[in-house]
Amino acid sequence: MDPLQFLVPLGWIEVVGPMLPFAILVLALANVATRHFAHAQHVEQAESSDSVDRFLPHIFTNVGLVLLSCLFTLYQATGGALLTTFAVTVLIADVFEFEARNLEARNDMTIERPKSAIAASSLVLLYAVYYVLTAVNATFWSSLFA
């Protein structure tokens, strides 16, 4: 018996749960792509003005990663907690990196790459790939020996 079953109906998570690692992997890849586009936009904005604007698709992928990893925590508690920690780290790193890009734009410095956010997002990406490969491997072995 699940201790949360009386507070929140969690029957639907058993249906959606096996697909969550694939959704997290897609969002992690999208996050890497939007990070690249956001950096290019920040470099262009810094050349023309004294501030940079947030890149809305990148914010969407950050928040989506945190929400999906929280859902994954309901399906697999330990793995989801680790993934949520990494996703929140990416979100916090992006906040501080954005402020650093604003500071560089105001002081006419060269716009650097968001190194800490890149490192944190690579951890999310690696962990998502691990869970996808685990899910694919389990499907392969269960169909082989069934």
Image (cartoon, rainbow, N blue to C red):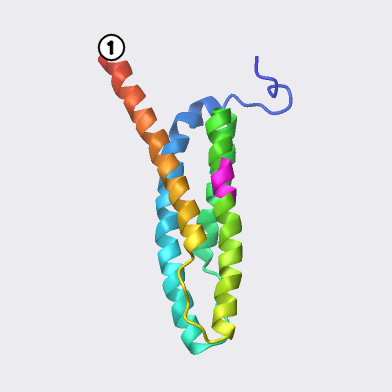
| Residue 31, placed above or below residue 98 | above
As rendered, which of 82 and 7 lies closer to the eye?
Answer: 82
Tell me residue 10's x, y (percent). Answer: 62, 26
As rendered, which of 98 and 12 lies closer to the eye?
Answer: 98
Residue furthest right in the image: 7
- Tell me the SS state at disc 1: loop
Residue furthest top in the image: 146
Magenta segment, which residues?
Answer: 84-88
Q: Residue drawn at (42%, 73%), measured in percent from left and top? A: 40
Label 1 crowding class (10 Å Cα cut-off): few <14, some 14-19, many 20+?
few
Tell me residue 43's x, y (percent). Answer: 45, 78
Residue type beneath disc 1: Phe
| Residue 1, placed above or below residue 5 | above
Q: Quadrant of residue 30?
A: bottom left
Residue wearing tag 1:
145
Residue 57 appears in view = yes
